[in-house]
Image (cartoon, rainbow, N blue to C red):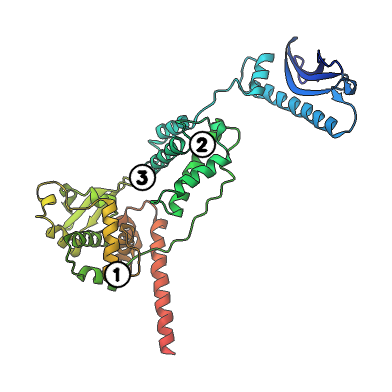
């Protein structure tokens, strides 16, 4: 069976010494008259073998299966030969056999993939996206160590069961919601797609995995709810401080991480002669220029002499993320607002109640939030439109 003048594949049998009526099936790969043999690890009856056709005689299930094995092997050997040609490799019978068996290729590991991604994507992905990938990579390494008792794994060994196991390990983490788990799975799928694009794997085991995001309503405070929180008197200073920093975010749009890193040097005099915040978003490294509204400036003034602020370069005595969220739950309960408050909710409140609802153009709001795409900010505009529509429906009901 000749594909070129020099490349030939044939099949033959070799009788077993202890059972001469039975034989083992072999393939012979020949290039330029130099050949190498390999066993197909299949036994058959000698009487049923047709050497001229390189097939088993008959139509039994055994004959059909063995003849299919011969056809499949022949096709894969052709494929191995063609791939060596395309790569401009030195082609020998031994090289074709090695390519067929997959022992001539370097086998890459998951850690090598993670290192490659981190190195190559450093100047390509935005800071926040790269930071998210770093978290996903940490979870993958923890999964290998804690659930599988290994430090690394060959990419070719990663299968669908590995994918499901990684998802289960993420769901065991109390800090991750369903959508948080799905975000990490989405990044894992992208990493494996990169491995596929690099030809480090032949088949992507994560293709079958379906991402299942839950719809989450955007949480933000109405004008009345924001006022209620501002006016609430707390006996504990921890709650008062946490409330004030939350309100500060409602009037600046800054997320928790950026407020935590806010320094005195970030307050500068803007083009209008008033105080502005000049900083960069941790997530995207986008430059932010935010004019200080009166309420935000009042809070900064209030904590100017606080012990943690007075003798340092920080602007506000921000608690740790864990403590902050714990205090926010207490604040929500105290003011009797049936909403799950977070610093995301404060940012949403700034975008909706504080700015868009008061006529600030969406382009300006987008700049204040540090969005790189206007379409991201338009989500808030749709929320405002929906609120207006609902309010008008209520009004229509009263006017009837």
Looking at the image, the residue that sits furthest to the bottom is 400
Give the mark nearest the N terminus, 3 or 2: 3
Q: CA distance from mark 1 to mark 2?
A: 45 Å
> Which residue sits at x=83%, y=23%?
44
Give the mark nearest the N terminus, 1 or 2: 2
Packing grade of label 3 (10 A; few <14, some 14-19, many >=20) is: some
Query: Where residue 64 sits: x, y (%)?
Result: 83, 32
Looking at the image, the residue that sits furthest to the front is 18
Name the image quarter holding the N terminus.
Answer: top right
Residue 358 image label: 1
Residue 128 image label: 3
- In the rendered view, tell whether residue 309 sits above or below residue 356: above
In the rendered structure, the answer to whether residue 374 lies left or right of residue 236 reads: right
Packing grade of label 1 (10 A; few <14, some 14-19, many >=20) is: few
Q: Which residue is mark 2?
A: 194
> Which residue sits at x=30%, y=71%?
336
Query: Where residue 69 sits: x, y (%)?
Result: 77, 28
Callout 2: SS: helix
Query: Where residue 232 sits: x, y (%)?
Result: 21, 70
Depth check: give the residue in front, 388 or 10: 10
Q: CA distance from mark 3 to mark 2?
A: 20 Å
Depth check: give the residue in front, 326 or 147: 147
Packing grade of label 2 (10 A; few <14, some 14-19, many >=20) is: some
- In the rendered view, tell whether residue 242 sits above or below residue 285: below
Callout 1: SS: helix
**Marks 3,2: beta carbons within 8 A:** no
Which one is closest to the eye, mark 3 or mark 1? 3
Query: Where residue 273 sits: x, y (%)?
Result: 14, 57
Give the mark nearest the N terminus, 3 or 1: 3
């Amino acid at each position: 069976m000749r594909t070129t003048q020099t490349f030939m594949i044939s099949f033959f049998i070799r009788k077993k010494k202890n059972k001469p009526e039975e034989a083992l099936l072999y393939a012979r790969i020949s290039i330029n008259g130099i050949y190498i043999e390999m066993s197909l690890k299949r036994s058959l009856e000698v009487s049923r073998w047709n050497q001229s056709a390189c097939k088993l005689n008959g139509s039994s299930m055994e004959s059909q299966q063995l003849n299919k094995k011969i056809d499949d092997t022949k096709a894969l050997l052709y494929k191995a030969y063609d791939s060596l040609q395309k790569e401009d490799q030195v082609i020998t019978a031994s090289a074709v056999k090695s390519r067929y068996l997959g022992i001539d290729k370097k086998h890459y590991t998951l850690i090598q993939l993670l290192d490659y991604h981190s190195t190559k994507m450093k100047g390509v992905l935005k800071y926040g996206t790269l930071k998210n990938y770093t978290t996903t990579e940490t979870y993958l390494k923890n999964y290998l160590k804690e659930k599988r008792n290994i430090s690394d794994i060959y990419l070719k060994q990663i299968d669908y069961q590995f994918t499901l196991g990684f998802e289960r390990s993420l769901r065991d983490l109390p800090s991750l919601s369903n959508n948080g788990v799905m975000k990490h799975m989405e990044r894992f799928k992208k990493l494996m797609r990169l491995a596929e694009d690099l030809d480090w794997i032949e088949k992507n085991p994560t293709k079958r995995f379906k991402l299942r995001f839950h719809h989450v309503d955007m949480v933000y405070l109405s004008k009345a709810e924001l006022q209620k929180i501002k006016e609430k008197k707390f006996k504990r200073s921890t709650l008062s401080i946490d409330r004030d920093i939350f309100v500060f975010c409602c009037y600046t749009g800054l997320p928790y991480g950026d407020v935590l890193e806010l320094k005195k040097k970030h307050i500068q005099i803007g083009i209008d002669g008033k105080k502005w915040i000049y900083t960069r978003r941790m997530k995207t490294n986008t430059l932010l220029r935010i004019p200080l509204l009166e309420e935000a400036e009042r809070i900064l003034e209030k904590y100017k002499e606080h012990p943690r602020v007075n003798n340092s370069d920080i602007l506000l005595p921000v608690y740790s993320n864990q403590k902050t969220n714990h205090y926010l739950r207490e604040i929500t309960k105290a003011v009797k607002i049936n909403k799950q408050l977070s610093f995301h909710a404060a940012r949403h409140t700034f975008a909706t109640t504080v700015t868009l609802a008061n006529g600030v153009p969406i382009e300006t709001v987008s700049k204040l939030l540090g969005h790189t795409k206007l379409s991201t900010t338009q989500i808030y505009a749709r929320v405002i439109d929906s609120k207006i529509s609902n309010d008008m429906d209520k009004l229509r009901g009263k006017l009837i």
